[in-house]
Amino acid sequence: MIRLDSVSKVYKTSSRPALDGVSVDVDKGEFVFLIGPSGSGKSTFLRLLLREEVPSRGRVMVSNFDVAKMPRRKIPRLRQTIGCVFQDFRLLTNKTVAENVAFALEVIGKPKRTIAKVVPEVLELVGLEGKSDRMPNELSGGEQQRVAIARAFVNRPLVLLADEPTGNLDPDTSQDIMLLLERINRTGTTVLMATHDHSIVDSMRRRVVELDFGRVIRDDRRGVYGVGR
Ligand SMILES: Nc1ncnc2c1ncn2[C@@H]1O[C@H](COP(=O)(O)OP(=O)(O)OP(=O)(O)O)[C@@H](O)[C@H]1O
């Protein structure tokens, strides 16, 4: 589902590569933690998958898309196969919960009838039934992240990228969000999550890919965060 083949990325303004000869292969339906210290290249990894950056060398594949080579006009199609969740939720503050989720479908031209049907379904899936008319600032952080996950998932993407999704949440709320991501993963969605959260990585025992100075220094099938970190 995701393949990086000897990928390096050197930003113009930096002498040292952000990614340096990275090869990673993620199968459909896998759940993968991407860990590593600040500056190790995790966000660059995710940005390459979305074609927000192009590699300096190597090949990036997402589903059947040869991401770096594809023409610009096909980028929206790539991005429709990838849902994204961030640490800071990134909700539209002037829209209700339901409107935030609906918006993701409106921009890709889904018919009103479909939107009216699937938005309540996905809000129920994430445990927000009854809150569809609230504004984001009337929700807790955990609830806001649920809206963001609903929005990322409503179009049933093949891949869900999560960049520090629990970074602004307390430990209990973080566990709830992880249960939700596991549930989404069980539907067959490939989940790739960049995180610094030791306890989550240690409790879930999923695949762990660790970056350091832009290189993969560990790829464990059922990993932990790491001793002494
Ligand atoms: N747009 C950019 N221009 C120049 N250098 C960049 C750019 N983005 C990232 N870098 C550099 O690339 C390296 C990797 O950064 P990246 O953001 O991918 O790391 P990260 O592991 O996501 O860090 P964090 O955990 O702090 O988010 C760092 O040295 C960073 O300074």
Image: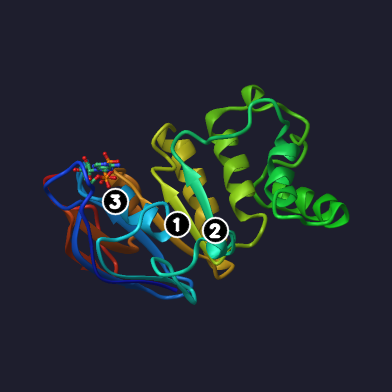
Whether tag 1 and tag 2 are in contact, CB under 8 A, the answer is yes
Query: Which of the 4 quarters of the picture holds residue 6?
Result: bottom left
Q: Name the residue under label 1.
A: 50
User: Residue 81: percent from the left, percent from the top?
Assistant: 56, 64
3 or 1: tag closer to the N-terminus: 3
Cα distance, mark 3 to mark 1? 13 Å
- Disc 1 element: loop
Cα distance, mark 3 to mark 2? 19 Å
Cα distance, mark 1 to mark 2? 6 Å
- Disc 3 element: helix
* Residue type at the position of mark 1: Leu
Point out which mark residue 79 bears. 2
3 or 2: tag closer to the N-terminus: 3
User: Counting other residues with Cα less than 10 Å from the Cα at mark 3, is it few (<14), some (14-19), or many (20 or more)?
Assistant: many
User: Residue 134: percent from the left, percent from the top?
Assistant: 73, 28
Whether tag 3 and tag 1 are in contact, CB under 8 A, the answer is no
* Residue type at the position of mark 2: Arg
- Is residue 202 among the parts visible in the rendering? no
- At 45% from the left and 44% from the top, the residue drawn is 175
Q: Nearer the viewer, residue 145 or 12?
A: 12
Query: Which of the 4 quarters of the picture holds residue 19?
Result: bottom left
- 192 to the left or right of 224: right
User: Residue 166: percent from the left, percent from the top?
Assistant: 42, 40
Q: In which quarter of the image is the C terminus?
A: top left
Q: Does the residue labelled 3 lie within 8 Å of ligand 1?
A: yes
Q: Ligand 1 is located in which of the four quadrants?
A: top left
Q: Which of 194 and 173 is in front in this view?
A: 194
Q: Name the residue under label 3.
A: 42
Residue 66 lies, with reference to residue 144, above or below; the image says below
- 222 to the left or right of 131: left
* Residue type at the position of mark 3: Lys
